Amino acid sequence: MAKVVVSLGMGVDSVGVLTRFLLEPETRDFDLDDLIVMTSMTGDEFSETAEHMERFVLPLMRRFSVRYVQLSRGGQLAASRYAVLDDSRQPRRMRMAGPWRLRDEQLGNGTVPQFASNRRTCSIKSKGEPLDWWKQDNLDGQPYQHVLGFSAEEGDRILKDSVYASSSRLARFPLAEWGWTRADTRGYLHEVFSTAWPRSCCVYCPFALSDPEYLAGRWRREPEGAALALLMERRSLALNHRATLFSRGSALQFAIDHRLDHVLALTEEMLHGGPWALYDVRRIYHPATDKQTRRHIATKKGAAWRSVTTLAEGTRDQMAGELHRLARSHRAEPRTDEFAITRARIRAPDVGRYPATEQFLSVGPAGVHDKQRKSFAGLWTRLVDQTSLFAA
């Protein structure tokens, strides 16, 4: 019999599928000995997710002796592969974090999770890839049924999944087969467990703003997680004034609007007690490329390359003083924005004419890694020299 792999994201849909499979055997066409339930951890879930899993789902898996594999990514690079946190038919604890957390990449790069085009690249890296690598290593290329918790109203996601079809992977979407919507599954779990099942997401998930009051309640109950989200946003904004956590506004303003005073105080305490850095941030804006002719469009902005260099570290006041000193030497005027981030712009991009260059100094929480492409320095020098020559 082929193996059956259930991707358990710990949210309403996937928990609903697994629960019904176990309690209503007529809904499945496989033996439980062939079932493997898998979760890959981002490391930054709300704690109530783990609490619900340990209170309700793990006892159910122990009761039916279901194999449960808990993983995490082994490190930021693909070469690190995955780490097995637990592999048991009698799981007792949720292992919610491994050697690498999604926050490690976001904080180290000075970014927030990307929400462009509604693509969840963070989920691919922290969840999808480790699960795929484990299956490659442990299923030996044998055919398997892959069970996913896409609800009946998620036809687009089901269609998109067809791109990943292969000779060994047969995808199945039980909720769609049953005609169950998210509301149906939520009602089923409430009936079985007598509790409202929480959403599964990171404390800093940019998509959580779809239900503002629900998010505000979670942040109020877990202020440490909310403070992490605000700290992540603060680092990101120090390097890019547009890089707020949410596409429709900042996490800081969200906390202010919802009167999350404890979260704001905790965040300020973290910022005050931690080291600060003076960053040199440079960007090269490439021209866009016409998809048909492959020619550059000099009047339209394309991809951007970023270089970040830490010039100094110290207290917030020390770094502010150093920024003002360097700004004077460049004849730049420091400005402080609505997020209390001070920058001094040294080079402004020529908007509407690409390639273009940008450079500014910024003070922000320390910890962003120095990073730039190998070819960045050479291209930067050429573009700056050309600009200077053109200006002369």
Image (tube, grey):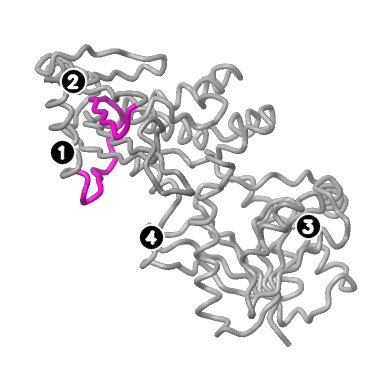
Question: Foreground mark, 1 or 3?
Answer: 1
Q: How far apart are marks 1 and 4 (CA)?
A: 35 Å
Q: Do the residues labelled 4 and 2 touch (CB within 8 Å)?
A: no
Q: Are marks 3 and 2 in contact (CB under 8 Å)?
A: no
Label 2 belongs to which residue? 323
Q: Callout 3 environment at 10 Å: few (<14), some (14 to 19), or many (20+)?
A: many
Task: Give the image location of residue 327, x and y in percent.
Answer: 16, 17
Quick one: label 1 or label 2, which is nearer the N terminus?
Answer: 2
Question: Foreground mark, 3 or 2?
Answer: 2
Q: How far apart are marks 4 and 3 (CA)?
A: 31 Å
Asked if the magenta segment contains residue 4, the reply would be no
Label 4 belongs to which residue? 75
Tell me which amino acid carries mark 4: Gly
Q: In which quarter of the image is residue 269?
A: top left
Magenta range: 353-376
- Residue for point 69% across, 27% down: 213
Q: Is residue 62 above or below residue 217?
A: below
Q: Callout 1 environment at 10 Å: few (<14), some (14 to 19), or many (20+)?
A: few
Q: Do the residues labelled 4 and 3 touch (CB within 8 Å)?
A: no
Tell me which amino acid carries mark 2: Leu
- Residue for point 48% across, 56% down: 125
Q: Distance between the residues labelled 1 and 2?
A: 26 Å
Tell me which amino acid carries mark 3: Gly
- Residue for point 18% across, 14% down: 332
- Residue for point 69% across, 68% down: 6
In the image, 4: left or right of 27?
Answer: left
Q: How far apart are marks 4 and 2 (CA)?
A: 34 Å
Residue 382 tag number = 1
Residue closer to the observer: 366 or 53: 366
